[in-house]
Every structure is written in structure tokens, then in C-alpha cells.
Amino acid sequence: MSMGSTPGTSGRPTAGGVGRRDLIKRAAALGIISVPTMSFLSACASGGGGDNDKAKTSKKTKSNPFGVAKDNDLDVFIFKGGYGDAYAKAWEASFEKKYGGSVAHSGEQDVTGKLQPRFNKGNPPDVVDDSGSKKMKLDTLHKEGHLTDLTQLLDAPSIDDPSKKIRDIMLPGTIEQGTFGGKFHALFYVYATWGLWYSNKLFKKHGWEVPKTWDQMLDIMKDAKSKGIGGLAHQGKYPYYMNIVIMDLIAKTGGMDAVKAIDNLEKKAFVGNPAAERAIEAVYEIVEKGLLMPGTNSLEHTEAQTKWNEYKAVFIPSGSWLENEQAKQTPDDFEMTFLPLPLLPDSKMKLHALRTGADEPFIVPSKAKNVPGGLEFLRRMLSKEGATAFAKEASSLSVIGPEFVDKSVQLRPGIKTALAAVDACPVDERFNFRYSEWYGELDVAIQNATGELMAKRITPKKWLERCQAAVDKEAEKNPDTKRK
């Protein structure tokens, strides 16, 4: 999640009277840069498109709530990761047919690297899918005023049923996930599920039963090791994935109190939190007993996942995009299967509890040329046509639920096992974390600590201390943030 840096331009004040040096100081205070290096946010004072460059607008009506005029161009940037970008091309073709003009499409993985220069110049895309390991930090974008308030999207009529507002058709938690500073700034579009994955073919071959407890899972890993198979593969260069295991184990062991302690930046979020202490010790046991797939700590995400597809490991952590991302590498008879994280003794959550909810944030930059078009593009994503295109091309669901997907669409077998796990989990036992989006620097700090832990360079005790120190640092900057 590196922000990178770009040389700046003149030190003249902007229209608001804030000069380049002031912006650098503000960015440094937020921890975005180290002076004298300058991030893209401090460079945003360097001019760019003015009001004369803005797209033309039309009269706002119930069917055109944002006043989108015909024949305006639209610029869409998509993170081309596990979901690919074919779904976005389908959305763009539909938008062009409806409103004319042309839609410029970019499908990339390095979001910050590609968009930083454009934000610097005040010329960002109209729609951005801000995801992946090199995404921009949403909390920083919010603090620096680079996000359009999407509350107007929530209050706009649904395309399929204008008697309902967009907010009324979203699944629970979607609005909260995209709310920063009391305003809805990011549409987390994908309904995702996180956990462990395994090959049912491999399980049947070795006579393993699906584990319900942490010890049962370790027993399978030990048996696999004796057969020359790694117990757990993880995407070592991106500790985000291993944090799926660690954070979910904290949640399932300590319940929602443990989740909220982290999101609310509490003094005992990690150090002094029995659930966190038990969870990290349990995870470290996998490292200590040599149950990791050899070499996994140094692998890219797709490298680790491909070795897992080659039966080099039993389990791998990931989200519900995994099957789509590995479609070309997965054997036809692999039988990819989702597994909610097994339990430690006396866990407060049940086995079927799992992390699930809104993921993959889409934003409309405040300095975009065609903000009305960007808002309408998001509204059309939240329609039967948009949800069906996404399910067809990405084999996943959106945050408006399966009822908006045409019945002709057939999802892949693996994602069906994840959705079955969601169906088996009561709504009030589903959970999700907010800290990774609300506090970008905290997320990076926890990931870095996890990378060190998995490489056996720090102890569980040190991991807890590093994570707590990062929480305490963030709490000083955000003393009033509270999750209900």
C-alpha cells in the first residue's frame, strides 16, 4: 500500500490560500510522507482541470437524479485483480449505449502508481475501483478532501424500482463500511467472504475430515507434512492474506468485543486482550512446528495460490475472489472448497461464524471532470443489469444480493461453497472489520508485523506490542472514532 512520491511544482498558494509547503507539512503530520519527500496528496495543489473543464450537465429528474447530460465522456479506472475487469467493460458498454459519449477504460493493478500523477495534476478519473495491495488509502483521501460525498447516491431512486432508494436495497453494513467522518464516501460493491480454502479432492485422497477445531486443523497439517505436503500456504509478500487467519481467529475467540476493540483503537486492542494473545500464539504454532509450505513467505499471492492448486499445501487463506483469480491454474477436478476458520477452545463465536460483508471500494474523486456521470455509473452498477454482469464475469455477488442476479447465471462451484457458508451463518453472527479502511497506516503496520512473525523474526509477544503501538499512535490522531 505504498503511496510513492512525485516531484512537486511551484510553491504558489492555491485558491484557498494553502501553499505547497503547508500541504507538505499537513501530509507529514498525517504520516503520509517523510519530509522532504512529497506524496501525491501534497502535490495536489499543483493546478489541473478547472470548472471550465467540467462535463456538461442536464436537468435532474427522478430517472436522471444527477443531471447526466448526453454525449459526455467518462473515465473509469478498475483494479484488475481477482475479479478481473471484464465486468467493468460490460458496465461501460451499457453506459455508453444509454448516454452516448465514450468511456475510457483502464484495468491495472498498481492503483497508486498509475493514479498518483493524475491526482497531482487535478485530473483524476471519474470512477476509481481503489483496491489491491497498491491501493490508495481511503482515510487519507477523505481527510484531504479528494472524495465526493456519495450520500446523494444513497438517496437516489433504484433503477429497477424507483419507489425504493439505493440505500434501501443494500445489504447491512455496506453504508457503514464506506462511511468516513460521518459521510458516505466509498461504495464497497462486492459482497465478499473471507476464510480458509482447501481441495476436497485432496481431502478425500488422504481421508481427512473437515476440521471443526484448531487442533483438528493442526493434526491435518502434521499428517500432510509427513506426506511431503505443506500444511498452510500463504501469500507471503502480501501479509494481508495471513491477517485473514489472525484477525478472524481473534474475532471468533473473543467475539464482537474483540473486533470493536481494534476498530475503536482501544488501549487493550492487542496487548491485554486475551483473545488476541491466544490467537497469535495459536497461529505462531504453525510457524514453530514447520507446518508452513516451504518458501511460502517469499511468494507473490498468485505464486502461492498456484502452488496450492498443485497440491503443494492443504490450506490457503483468501477471500471469495480466489476461485475467479485462479480459474486458469485450477485443475478441473480440484473441488475448491471454502472453510470458516476452525475454533480455539472456549471461543465466543460459533464455528459457522465468519467474516463477510462489503468489499472492493469504488469512489468518485471530488476533482473528477464528470462527477454526475461517475455517480450515475455507480447507480447503474447497483441494478439488476449491473449485478448480473458482475456475477457472470467475476462469479461473485454484489452488495444488493443474489435476488438481483439473473437466474441464468451459473456461479463457479467454489464460490457456491462460500455462499453456502454465508447462508448457514445467521446474520447476527457475521462480522467484518473496519480498521483496514478507516486507518490505512494501522493496516500497514499490522501487515508488516505479521510478515515479520511468519518469517520467525519476531515473537507473538512482540507482534502484540507492535500492533498495540500502532493502535495507540492512530488513537492519538483519531480520539473520537467509535464503532457502534
Image (cartoon, rainbow, N blue to C red):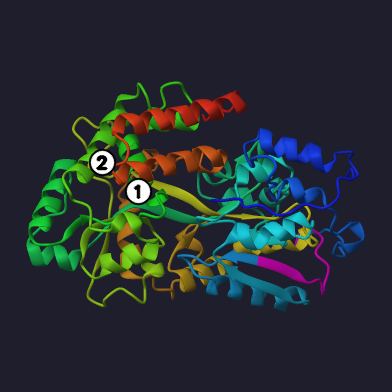
Residue lying farthest front? 36
Give me the disc on residue 296: none
The magenta segment is 62-76
Contact between marks 1 and 2 (CB within 8 A): the answer is yes
Place residue 102 in its image quadrant: bottom right
Percent coordinates x, y for residue 276 in the rendering: 33, 31
Q: Main secondary structure of the magenta part?
A: loop
Q: Residue type at mark 2: give it.
A: Val
Give me the disc on residue 283: 2
On the picture, is 286 further left or further right than 99? left
Q: Residue type at mark 1: give it.
A: Met
Element under disc 1: helix
Residue at image position (73%, 60%) is 118
| Residue matched to label 1 | 242
Sequence-earlier tag: 1 or 2: 1
Magenta span includes 66: yes
Question: Would residue 154 be seen by someone viewing this image from the given angle?
Answer: yes
Label 1 CA crowd tier, 10 Å (few <14, some 14–19, many 20+): many
On the picture, is 116 further left or further right than 14? left
